[in-house]
Image (tube, rainbow, N blue to C red):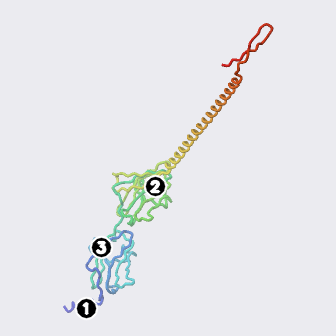
Amino acid sequence: MLLTFYLLFIGLPVSEGCTLENRGRPLFITARTGESVLLPCYCTDHVPPDAFLWVKENTDSNEWEEVSSESGQYRDRVQLVNGHSPGNLSLLISHLTEEDGGNYRCEVKGSGYTDIRLTVEGCNLEKTDITQYITARTGGSALLSCYCTDLHTKPETFTWKKLNTNTNMYEEISGGKGQYRDRVQLVNGHSPGNLSLLMSHLTEEDGGFYLCELKGNKRTYIKLTVEEGSTKTTTSTAITASFQTPVSTASQTPSMHLSIVILVVLLLGLLLLGGVVYWRYRGQRQGQMESGEQKGMEREQETQDQVTYSTVVHNNRTSTPTAIHTEDMTEYASIRVN
């Protein structure tokens, strides 16, 4: 009994005055892949570096293993953050992976430990019950869409592949070599979970089956058909029978040609309507002028008749018959006005 008390007395100065916060009460923390997370552990007093330890539970062996930045899966990804607070024993883990999830423990000699349950959410592809069929034109562009259900979740790794019909195997697509040189690019600018691929300057050889593949056998499939003609991209979706993990629908690219044609037709219609109105107005104007000229001629003719009639009336007097003597006959001349 005396020996037991003596050993305890020797151990007390190591952790004298240190009381762990949240001791005996587990913490639950959730983070996303690709992000950083802080596992908190605080002591009320200074703790020497060799008096505490971070460990993680190995689910396969049910043993606790030390977390170290010197080796293993945490190499150059973990660090202590107790710079200005000697009692701050928190651990920072960066560039999280799904494998980082699990049970962690902050142990302080003579003061116990604090347990933390870390859940790391990875990328889950959305709309896995449908496949995407895209039809595009040679020389145009096509967007092969692939999304995480949470757009803020960045997958650890992912690749785009195309089916080689000769070998019946999927081969990785690279924008730096082969037929896709300088023609493909990712469009995940502001959304880490947007894994979509944009292909430009399409050729008929670009048609075929594509897949977006994530770590953990997560895949989504796309069927691209490239036809000859002007640039036009259409998208449709359907239930797939040959694949178990299809893809989400891509956005349609509207054609500007239809709008231009409609605008031209409207302008031609307006010009035609203006021409019809102009010719109708001109015809009416010409008819009015002809009608006016006809009426003027009629008035002029009437005036001439009246002048003639007045002349006759002016001379409308019965004069005494004038005898015209000739050698053998006498004729009488007279003027008769009806």
Instruction: Name the residue that disc number 1 marks.
Output: 9
Quarter that holds the N terminus: bottom left
Q: In the picture provided, is 36 more to the left or to the right than 284? A: left
Q: Point out the frontmost of discs 3 and 2.
A: 3
Q: Point out the frontmost of discs 2 and 1.
A: 2
- Give the mark nearer the N terminus: 2 vs 1: 1
The residue nearer to you, when weighing 36 against 63, is 36
Q: Say which amino acid is labelled 3.
A: Phe
- Give the mark nearer the N terminus: 3 vs 2: 3
- Residue 284 appears anywhere in the view: yes
- Whole-percent x and y of residue 224? 43, 52
Badge 2 vs badge 1, beta-carbon distance below 8 Å: no
Q: Point out the frontmost of discs 1 and 3.
A: 3
Q: Secondary structure at mark 2?
A: strand
Where, by quadrant of the figure, is residue 157 drawn? bottom left
Label 1 crowding class (10 Å Cα cut-off): few <14, some 14-19, many 20+?
Answer: few
- Whole-percent x and y of residue 281? 58, 39
Label 1 – label 3 distance at C-alpha = 35 Å
Q: Residue at x 35, y 66 (%)?
A: 122
Q: In the picture provided, is 197 more to the left or to the right than 38? A: right
- Whole-percent x and y of residue 217? 35, 61
Label 3 – label 2 distance at C-alpha = 43 Å
Q: Is residue 82 above or below residue 33?
A: below
Instruction: Tell me the tag on residue 28.
Output: 3
Q: Secondary structure at mark 3?
A: strand
Q: Say which amino acid is labelled 1.
A: Phe
The residue at the far front in this view is: 320
The residue nearer to you, when weighing 116 against 179, is 116
- Residue 165 appears anywhere in the view: no
Label 2 crowding class (10 Å Cα cut-off): few <14, some 14-19, many 20+?
Answer: many
Badge 3 vs badge 2, beta-carbon distance below 8 Å: no
Instruction: Name the residue that disc number 2 marks.
Output: 142
